[in-house]
Image (tube, helix red, strand yellow):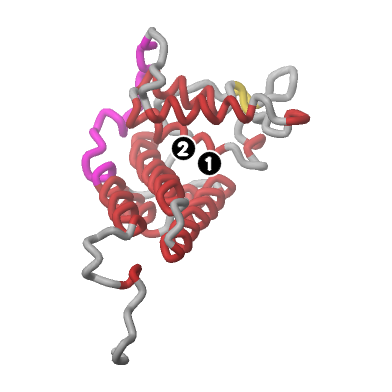
Amino acid sequence: MIPGHHAPSSLRLSDGGRNPLNRSLVFALLASAAIALSCPAQLRAEEEPTPHRTGELSLLNPAVLAIRTWQLFSHHAPFHIMNCQFRPSCSEYGLDAIREAGTPRGVLCAADRVIRCNPWAGRHYDRDADGRLRDPFTPGPHFRSHTAPQVCIPLSLVVPGLNKMANGRLADGLTTLLVTDLTGYSAYRASRSGSWLAIPCAIAFSLFYASDVYFNCISLGER
């Protein structure tokens, strides 16, 4: 190294692991691998509807608080520009998923719904009288995977969305790839510049990445 020249903090090995991107990406990879390896057999088979859990969702739950905060903004957006094409909306779907399936699984279901809320979603869902797409919360997979398990999981880990594309969900697969790339690259750039945005971008990347692996795993029961 040139005398007097110091490596950027994001490249130093002696920074005590304070780079938020490194920790978040490692978490995403470990979480996705854990889902792939520990996905129980009953989730791979056709699932029975989860009994409805009564009671209000607590705002002390960070996931619930984040969704409610988003609703305060989206429900009051001018000209209804934030209206969702689905019924229930993606935010309400997320709350239903957390209420019925618990927070960890519900958050992954909510992330998957955001991926499925793309401009080509109308090909896969029926419409209500007002044109909204019907998609109430269900705990099972949303597509049938014909990929062998030993291929499906590596596809999900290496290239997000590729297994969906290989199984007839081209739009969902491309959206998954685009969103994970954008959030991952945004986290990288924000981390390099020392911006606080590195944390939320890395969290978003982790959720979209892990949800892709999770739903590809449970779709194996639909083969």
33 and 83: which is toward the camera: 83
185 and 113: which is toward the camera: 185
At which x and y percent is residue 199? 40, 49
SS of the residue at dot 2?
helix
Region in magenta: 34-53
Q: Quadrant of the C terminus?
A: top left
Residue located farthest toward the right when viewing the structure as drawn: 79
Residue at left 29%, top 54%? 23
Q: Amino acid at mark 2?
A: Ala
Q: Is residue 9 visible?
A: yes
Query: Which residue lies under the disc numbered 1?
Result: 115
Residue at left 32%, top 30%? 45
Query: Which residue lies under the disc numbered 2?
Result: 111
Q: Are marks 2 and 1 in contact (CB under 8 Å)?
A: yes
For residue 112, side relative to residue 132 (left or right): left
At which x and y percent is residue 176? 50, 49
Q: Which mark is residue 207?
A: none
Residue at left 43%, top 32%? 109
At which x and y percent is residue 124? 60, 34
Mark 2–mark 1 Cα distance, whole angstroms, equals 7 Å
| Res 212 → quadrant | top left
Residue located farthest toward the top when viewing the structure as drawn: 54
Q: Quadrant of the N terminus?
A: bottom left
SS of the residue at dot 1?
helix
| In the rendered image, the vertical position of residue 97 relative to residue 111, given as above or below | above
